[in-house]
Amino acid sequence: MRINVKANFRITGIEADHLEIKGHPTLGEVLVDLAKRSEFPFVLSDGKIDPEVEVLLNGLEYPFLPKRLDTPLNEGDNVEIMILALGGG
Amino acid sequence: MLTADELTRYSRQLLIPEVGLEGQERLKNSRVLLAGVGGLGCSSSQFLACAGVGSITLVDRDTVALSDLNRQVLYGQDDIGKKKVEVAAVRLSRLNPGVEIHSRFVEISEGNASQLLVGIDLVMDGLDNFPARFCMNSACVERKIPYVYGGIAGLKGAVAAIVPGKTPCLACIYPRTRTHEGPHPVLGSVPAIIANLQVLEAIKILTGRYDSSAGRMVFFDGSEMTFSRLELKRNENCKVCGKEKR
């Protein structure tokens, strides 16, 4: 199964903005895998997402998904992982 | 050529191989624009001046307020109500009389950002909002001028040096931003940390020693005392520096 993954920082293995995965893992399971491929540990030790990172599935922020990180992924889903802008100065 | 006084003033940093005499002369001939003289800018401007950057242009639209004084260390109680750029210019000149300080009391906008950069070698980000940052980013990409982004929120901060043509630009990194309502939470030491990392990046660029950090962002988390380094991704469809703009 192929899903599309966009991030504003480098994650090894998604250079072409997509990822081949087996079965139907959940969003959370895929994020754990992607976080291990990044220099930025955006999945915290308790399994939560770093609050400075925004995760969207098909344009919807994950906290607004009915099953949140337990949402199963499907072929062609679009996952966005963006480190949030720090705007103060 | 450095004067005898300058050779003494900068003697400790002349010992650093990455600076040296050649690097110091490059700093002396450099012209930096500091966009915003708030929490970040008050710290970065002092170390840019102390390091011997030849010319610093301060741009800010604000006057000093009591609520600035927990972090904006160029200002004191008796400066409340005064223009930040004017107070800062006096303080910085006292720190290093050999540095030319220019003051511009204006708001950065699409209409003036490019014009502000005439004759400038590098822009330091000391801004407190993203609309102005994006104006400055676009103008820097247009004029191929390095831009050292710095941002903070609470106990966190981020630094990224943007070198047009070599690294992703700010609009690549942040294709969208959330609008922040109300004042940003900030403890003075956090912008000071981030500003000093910005200065380090700026000096590396100005002295021609910039390579290892290109295209990376350093992310600081003060509650965990961690630094993370992220390799940033260029957005090929970026409306500022994407392939259609090249």
Image (cartoon, coloured by chain):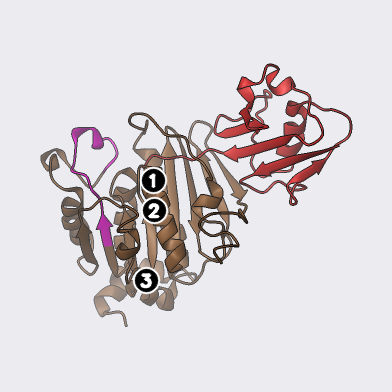
Callouts 3 and 1 in the same chain: yes
Q: Is residue B68 magenta?
A: yes
- Determine contact: label 2, label 1, CB under 8 Å: yes
- SS label for mark 3: helix
Q: Which chain is displayed in brown in the rendered image?
A: B
Q: Which residue is mark 3?
A: B27
Our reading of the magenta stretch's main secondary structure is loop
In percent of width and height, residue B152 lies at 42, 40
Q: CA distance from mark 3 to mark 1?
A: 30 Å
Q: Which mark is residue B218?
A: none
Q: Which residue is mark 2?
A: B135
Judged by depth in the image, the label closer to the viewer, 3 or 1, is: 1
Classify 10 Å Cα crowding around label 2: few (below 14), some (14-19), many (20 and above): some
- SS label for mark 2: helix
Q: Which residue is mark 1?
A: B131
Q: Is residue B38 above or below residue B106?
A: above
Q: Residue furthest left?
A: B78
| Residue A88 falls left or right of residue B233 | left
Q: Measuring 19% from the left and 36% from the top, which residue is drawn there?
A: B65
Q: Chain of mark 1?
A: B
Magenta stretch in the rendered image:
B57-72
Q: Quadrant of the N terminus of chain A?
A: top right
